[in-house]
Structure formats: structure tokens, C-alpha cells
Image (spheres, rainbow, N blue to C red):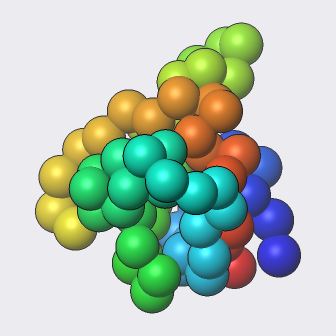
Amino acid sequence: MKTLREAACGERVTVIRLEGEGALRRRIMDMGLTKGAVVYVRKVAPLGDPVEITIRGYELSIRREDAERVLVD
């Protein structure tokens, strides 16, 4: 397993698990990043923050700290 942050540009991955708890975990889930969701990594900024993804038919930019809490396969 790896984190969403480690996924390469152009890669399609599936969310396996979310790390964290409380409000942080809830915020990530509210963005659509839930177990089993398929994520396409569109772009990664030059310094690695943010990561632009496509999930559930919409585009989303996610911070590096949040992307590190999403385990994917």
C-alpha cells in the first residue's frame, strides 16, 4: 500500500483506508475520498502541494498533508 501523495501523475488508484480521526477524517470523507472510491491523479504541483485529482466525476485539489492520510492500492 501507498499513500495518495505517492501515486504518480496519470495513475488510477483505489482508496483502501483513511488515517486520522475526528474532524480531519470527516473533512476528507466529505470530499468524496471514501473506501473503494477510484481516484485518477491528474497533476502534482512542482513542490508536491497540492495534488489535483479526479474523483466521482469532479476535479479536486487536495493538500499534501491530507493526501498523506489516504492509503491507496
Say left or right for 29 vs 47: left
**In the image as oriented, which residue stretches furthest toward the right?**
1
Where in the figure is residue 20, as x and y percent of width and height?
Answer: 64, 55
Where in the figure is residue 51, as x and y percent of width and height?
Answer: 53, 34
Say left or right for 42 vs 54: right
Q: Residue at x 45, y 86 (%)?
A: 36
In this view, 39 is above or below 4: below
In this view, 53 is above or below 57: above
**In the image as oriented, which residue stretches furthest toward the front?**
22
Task: Identify the image quadrant of residue 16.
Answer: bottom right
Q: Quadrant of the C terminus?
A: bottom right
Numbered label tally: 0
**In the image as oriented, which residue stretches furthest toward the bottom?**
36
Q: Residue at x 16, y 62 (%)?
A: 57
**In the image as oriented, which residue stretches furthest toward the left?**
57
In this view, 69 is above or below 29: above
Q: Residue at x 40, y 73 (%)?
A: 34
Q: Residue at x 38, y 56 (%)?
A: 26
In this view, 25 is above or below 50: below
Where in the figure is residue 18, as x and y percent of width and height?
Answer: 59, 67
Say left or right for 27 vs 4: left
State whether residue 4 appears in this view: no
Q: Quadrant of the N terminus?
A: bottom right
Where in the figure is residue 8, as x and y percent of width and height?
Answer: 69, 50
State whether residue 63 appears in this view: yes
